[in-house]
Amino acid sequence: MFPLQAGFAREQDILSRRSKRQSQIKKALSALNRHGLIRTEFLLECKRTKNPLTRLNNPVPLEDADVASLICPSCGSKFGEELLSEGYTVSELGRRMAKQSHWMTVWTTDLLIKLGIPEDAILWNISENGEEVDLLVEFLGQLWIFELKDREFGAGDAHPLNYRQVRYRADKAIIFTTEKVSKDAKRVFEDLQRESIRRRGSLPVYIEGLDKAEEILRREIANASLSYARRRLVMIGETTGYDLGAVLSAKFSELDSIEDEIDGLPF
């Protein structure tokens, strides 16, 4: 998310790369710091060469006369006269969360639970014979497989996901990427679906960006709930002679239409 891979990034460098979003970035940095994912440090640099001299957890040691009088080997100035910049480094917790995009697993799990998926219906990081599944969700008689990518989902990711979906007999594959699902990857899935008449389920669900996740998952959960209710009503319908599933679908369609009309009103 931020250029901290090298271990330290100055705040001014982070903000300069995103000049139009400085307010958002400052809030994000504050939140990351507050939750212990990054920590504030200070970088002492040579004013003339910009070479780093040392990093400090706080600037207090530079107030000590003995430290402040140390001489820069590049320009001969005292440490107390050199350039001090505030910046950030990734904490140990932050490194654990970034490793294999673990933060996405936590974030997605929290969202699923918020949307009504029971925690005991979610399995994480299932690994077998070198194949790893980020998330499996068993919900209302369906099995969903999640692929989480903190980068673009490319064509090279498509075939392994298709294999895992078939292997686990998942009803639905959901690709959640912080960037995009490439056109080539989408083309692979379309080709696979055309070639295999025995393929279970449909094309993957694409979630491109964190801001799209809640809306798309809410819709998928609503559709799964409706499908489950219709299946449960089949036996009652056979006994009564009424197609209660159709009535339920019509009712949901009516509610969706009303919601669409409300959303379109100017208030």
Image: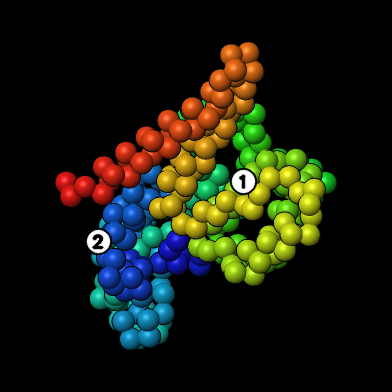
Q: Quadrant of residue 71?
A: bottom left
State the residue at coordinates (41%, 67%).
Answer: 9
**Residue at far left of view:** 267
Does the image show residue 222? yes
From this view, report whether residue 252 is shown above or below residue 167: above
User: In the displayed structure, does residue 157 sit left or right of residue 117?
Assistant: right
Quadrant showing the N terminus: bottom left
As drawn, the label of residue 15 is none
Three-letter code for the amino acid on which mark 2 is drawn: Ser
What whole-number distance in Å separates the C-alpha atoms at marks 2 and 1? 33 Å
Q: Which residue sits furthest top?
A: 239
Residue at 52% of width from left, 41% of height from top?
220
Indicate the secondary structure of the residue bearing disc 2.
Answer: helix
Q: Nearer the viewer, residue 216 or 103?
A: 216
Label 2 environment density (alpha carbons within 10 Å; few <14, some 14–19, many ≥20): few
In the rendered view, would you say 25 is above or below 205?
A: below
Percent position of residue 208, x then y: 50, 58
In this rendering, would 139 be left or right of 34? right
Q: Quadrant of residue 236?
A: top right
Kind of residue sitting beneath label 1: Phe
Question: What's the coloring here?
Answer: rainbow
> x%, y% of residue 111?
46, 39
Asked if residue 120 can be seen in this view, the reply is no
Residue where numbered disc 1 is placed: 146
Task: Locate residue 225, reporting x and y percent.
Answer: 53, 31
User: Which residue position holds label 2?
Assistant: 23
What secondary structure is found at the residue carrying circle 1?
A: strand
For the point 29% across and 76% down, which residue is it? 82
Q: Position of residue 195 (x, y in %)?
A: 78, 59
Q: Earlier along the polypeptide chain: callout 2 or callout 1?
A: 2
Q: Is residue 232 left or right of residue 261?
A: right
What residue sits 31% from the left and 74% below the top?
16
